Amino acid sequence: MAPWSKSSWQNFEALQQPKWADEAEYQEAIGSISKLPPLVFAGEIRNLKKDLALASEGKAFLLQGGDCSEDFHNCTAPVIRESLKVILQMAIVLSYAGGKPVIKVGRMAGQYAKPRSADLETIDGVSHPSYRGDMVNSPDFTAEARRPDAGRMLQGYHLSAATMNILRAFTRGGYASVQRVHSWNQEFVKSSPMGRHYDRLAKSIDQALNFMKVVGIDTDIPQLNQAIFYTSHEALLLGYEEALTRQDSITGGWYDCSAHMVWIGDRTRQLDGAHVEFLSGVLNPIGMKVGPKHDLDTICRLLDKLNPENEAGRITLITRFGESIDKHLPGLIRRIKQEGYKVVWSCDPMHGNTYTAETGYKTRNFNDILQEIQCFFEMHWAEGSVPGGVHFEMTGQNVTECTGGGRNIVAQNLTENYLTNCDPRLNAEQSLELAFQISEMIRR
Ligand code: PEP
Ligand code: CO
């Protein structure tokens, strides 16, 4: 077989690619992106891989979250800040309760392309190409809006760069200090309907921080005033990913510099497919979604291909089973253990729990999400393996897209602030509640 190169994927079948309207326009956009600077650096990617290696051994915990699909219009400082804020808040709760560092990875700064179940969407007898993410087309239901437009990839690159820049500023410039994030959590505990329930944990964190001050530990240090925040998205548009794949000048290795971590979706992880070929050669940490329709032998062959050296931190298996978790997860854990594969196990409790409410809105229920997470932890503990992380679709905006939670959003409330172009997200309050609930499960 021909050796890997950043373009060798082109010899394989690539599923879920848009039918770009104009080939010359496509080549021009890809050509421009390939000359633009990388969005992240190889050294940062290596650091994340080291952190994830710790998560695979239970010495760190992965928190990955953000929009199902980022929206070009929402590339604004307030929207980015509010999502970052919630992830930081969740991370403090989880790191305190779990007694280990939390690796923070946003579905941010590039999560602009989506796989879809059908190529066409039909409303009242009219069909247009499906919306495939802002980097491809626009959600409005008109022929013009749905036309795949390669210029959007270039725009997506620039908006990813702007997002990355503000994330770096927020996390390095004092905004992410532990003290400040904790004070937001205290506000949440005061204002949330379930607040009293979370009061005890918030108080112990407060005592721990005070204790450091009282005994004279210098709190003016980067570990307490800055956060390390990584980015990730689904590596779906392979032309775009190839254009941002660069050779590291220090090691000579190839890195996909569009994000620190990239993942491969449940729909595009064919063993002989273009996505697997592409990802097999870049050195980033790779996430792999695993849904109910998987086959154990194929998962093993995929791991052999994507991680032939069985390097810890390279692969995160993101399971998304929904209520069939008890049918699928124990067998998968046993097989991976038996074969000795090193992976980070992460739970995506979102994609197996989507349903359409009686009002016609696509939604997810808070309790179903919590239930899948609970099963995930218990099954790993029962099998003697390590539950290493969680993966959420969430936002800092006050949306009404998922039902349940402390304010008990019901189907009728979904219309109030339903903003997602794709899957329903947890809002800020629901996300924090989940973190507090998980903290009860993992509290040492
Ligand atoms: C997603 O993470 O938004 C997604 C499409 O997931 P999956 O590949 O698991 O369906
Ligand atoms: Co989604």
Image (cartoon, rainbow, N blue to C red):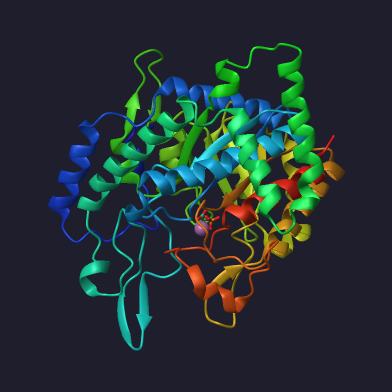
Please tell me whether residue 323 is drawn above or below residue 169 in the rendered image. Answer: below
Q: Is residue 292 visible?
A: yes
Q: Position of residue 370 (x, y in %)?
A: 73, 57
Q: Position of residue 443 (x, y in %)?
A: 82, 38
Q: Which of 415 and 372 is in front in this view?
A: 415
Image quadrant in which the N terminus is located: top left
Residue lying farthest to the left in this orientation: 24
Please tell me whether residue 144 is drawn above or below residue 48 in the rendered image. Answer: below
Q: Is residue 413 left or right of residue 11?
A: right
Q: Position of residue 440 (x, y in %)?
A: 81, 45
Please tell me whether residue 276 is drawn above or below residue 174 in the rendered image. Answer: below
Q: Position of residue 425 (x, y in %)?
A: 54, 59
Which residue is drawn at the image coordinates 30% and 63% (left, top)?
Answer: 138
Q: Nearer the viewer, residue 397 or 291?
A: 397
Residue 409, by quadrant, is bottom right
Say how many tags the image has: 0
Q: Is residue 25 left or right of residue 127?
A: left
Which residue is drawn at the image coordinates 70% and 38% (left, top)?
Answer: 93
Residue lying farthest to the bottom in this orientation: 124
Which residue is drawn at the image coordinates 32% and 37% (left, top)?
Answer: 161
Q: Can residue 1 be seen in this view?
A: no
Image quadrant in which the C terminus is located: top right
Residue 372, by quadrant, is bottom right
Q: Is residue 283 left or right of residue 53?
A: left
Which residue is drawn at the image coordinates 53% and 22% (left, top)?
Answer: 47
